[in-house]
């Protein structure tokens, strides 16, 4: 099925997109150096689209009823709304980069956007972080329903702990947390993606050509 291929590759590549954007920012994107800033935001943009697809696939696997299904829908909604905020952030940053010629101009336009009511919180604050709350809720539901392994749940929990550490800590060791966080995320999601990409086993009574 086409969806299986799209979802499979999304589960495998979504963490790669996150790490790719972060890495290119380390090359100078944080200071607005081109082309690293544009490349980083473009890679992140693709990564967030893949993450949204991955969350939809996790939701599809819940297949619960009653309160469980309501919780799954709320979790997916939180994740997708947050991903939409992240995608909007990437598009805004790309626009600012293309619309300005100097770092000073970039800072002025960036500040103008951040001064818009709630823009700071939605595009650059908690709005873009809520995806991990919805993502975790879906993973916990799948673990309770025994549709993913305890190892996958543990890796996702480790991912979130490392992400939180990256956000709240300061100092030289902080940067080392991100690669490990993305590695844990990839180890959790990639096996789910590979299974979707495997061809369906042929029925025993099927006629082979």
Image (tube, rainbow, N blue to C red):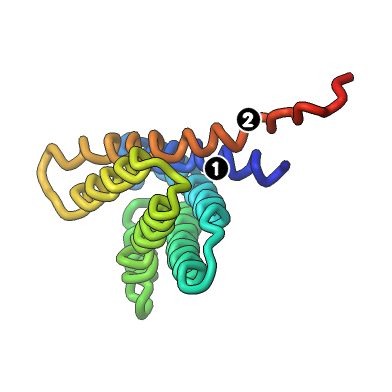
Q: Residue 93: tell me if it is visible.
A: no
Front residue of this view, candidates 56 and 125: 56
N-term mark: 1 or 2: 1
Front residue of this view, candidates 139 and 56: 139
Give me the residue at 65% from left, 39% from top. 5
* Disc 2 secondary structure class: loop
On the rendered structure, is 55 left or right of 2?
left
Give me the residue at 69% from left, 29% from top. 201
Q: Position of residue 169 (x, y in %)?
A: 13, 50
Query: Which image quadrant is residue 22 in?
Result: top left
**Mark 1 against mark 2, which lies toward the viewer?**
2
Give me the residue at 45% from left, 40% from top. 189
Circle 1 sits on which residue? 10
Circle 2 sits on which residue? 198
Q: Quadrant of the N terminus?
A: top right
Q: Position of residue 89 (x, y in %)?
A: 43, 60
Q: Which mark is residue 145?
A: none
Q: Quadrant of the C terminus?
A: top right
Residue extending farthest to the bottom is: 117
């Amino acid at each position: 099925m086409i969806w299986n291929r799209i979802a499979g590759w999304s589960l495998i590549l979504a963490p790669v997109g996150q790490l790719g954007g972060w890495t290119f920012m380390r090359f100078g994107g944080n200071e607005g150096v081109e082309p690293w800033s544009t490349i980083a935001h473009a890679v992140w943009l693709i990564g967030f689209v893949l993450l949204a697809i991955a969350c939809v696939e996790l939701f599809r696997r819940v297949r619960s009823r009653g309160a469980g299904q309501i919780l799954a829908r709320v979790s997916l909604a939180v994740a997708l709304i947050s991903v939409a905020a992240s995608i909007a952030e990437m598009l805004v940053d790309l626009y600012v980069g293309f619309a300005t010629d100097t770092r000073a101009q970039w800072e002025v336009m960036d500040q103008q956007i951040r001064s818009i009511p709630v823009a700071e919180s939605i595009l650059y604050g908690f709005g873009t972080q809520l995806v991990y709350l919805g993502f975790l809720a879906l993973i916990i539901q799948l673990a309770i329903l025994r549709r993913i392994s305890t190892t996958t749940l543990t890796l996702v929990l480790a991912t979130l702990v490392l992400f939180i550490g990256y956000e709240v800590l300061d100092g030289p060791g902080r940067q080392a947390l991100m690669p490990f966080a993305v590695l844990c995320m990839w180890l959790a999601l990639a096996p789910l993606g590979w299974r979707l990409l495997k061809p369906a086993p042929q029925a025993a009574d099927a006629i082979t050509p």
